Image: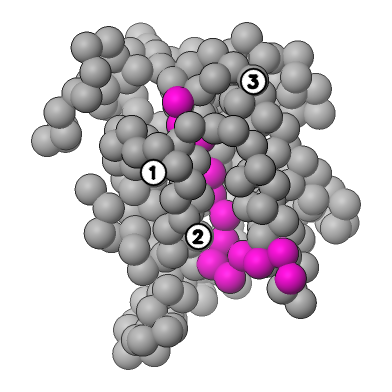
Amino acid sequence: MFALEVLALERRTALLLGASGLVGGELLKLLLESDLYRQVTIFVRTPLPIKHEKLQQVVVDFARLESYERHFYVDDVFCCLGTTRKKAKTKQQFIQVDYEYTLRAAALAEKCRVKSFLTVSSVGANPCSPFFYQRVKGEVEEALQRLSIPSLHIFRPSLLVGKRREFRLGEMLAGWLLCRLPFLFVGKWKKYKPVDAHQLALAMFYRAASAANGVHIYECDELACIS
């Protein structure tokens, strides 16, 4: 399916958190279809209706993430965990998913010496932001960069568009409208343009395959250029 050459003699292994979400679902398809990976493990709360010879589904309690340390002995960890203020109901529940779970996963990845850790953040992420969502995302990014992971990739998408499992009227209408007003996203506003979830998943896939060491942060308008 991909023109990408396998970069190592041994095919890779991956762990994906958030496979039931919009981006995670797209990424799972790419990982399973690619010859680059021989095994893909996903953490789920309930099993997904997917069967594949190289897929391993592990039903986990994310509040006890450290209990599943053995599954972090892989080449690449993809973290697509995330929720919304509405779904989380409280700020603390939002912080638990978007900050605590993500950071704990990264700490386990560091401990198990993964080659790369890739995670979804948000446009405008900044620990000093006056906006709660962007501030939490910025705090996560800051904490991740203090870890010693050889290859850390942080993606900052704007509004994500694609077919979600759950219906979100506000996001659907916003995505439909903004995608029809491209003239709004020029210059410094370019990074706020809505991005297709499949494009983000592709960018994450290719960056993992690149084996580029160091900390890499990608703004929304850079995603289409990653291949």
Could you say which quadrant of the image residue 115 lies in?
top left
Instruction: Tell me residue 189's x, y (percent).
Output: 43, 83
Asked if residue 126 shows in the view, the reply is: yes
Q: Is residue 213 left or right of residue 83?
A: left
**Residue drawn at x 34%, y 48% as measured from the top left:** 203
Residue type at the position of mark 1:
Met
Residue type at the position of mark 2:
Arg
Q: Which residue is mark 1?
A: 204
Q: Is residue 191 left or right of residue 63?
A: left
Between 202 and 56, the one nearer to me in the picture? 202
**Residue drawn at x 74%, y 23% as measured from the top left:** 65
- Distance in Å between CA atoms under marks 2 and 1: 11 Å
Between 63 and 53, the one nearer to me in the picture? 63
Between 108 and 173, the one nearer to me in the picture? 108
- Specify whether residue 78 is painted magenta: no
Q: Which residue is mark 3?
A: 111
Instruction: Tell me residue 161's x, y (percent).
Output: 44, 62
Could you say which quadrant of the image residue 146 lies in?
top right
Numbered range of the magenta stretch:
115-128
Assign a secondary structure to mark 3. Answer: helix
Q: Which residue is mark 2?
A: 156
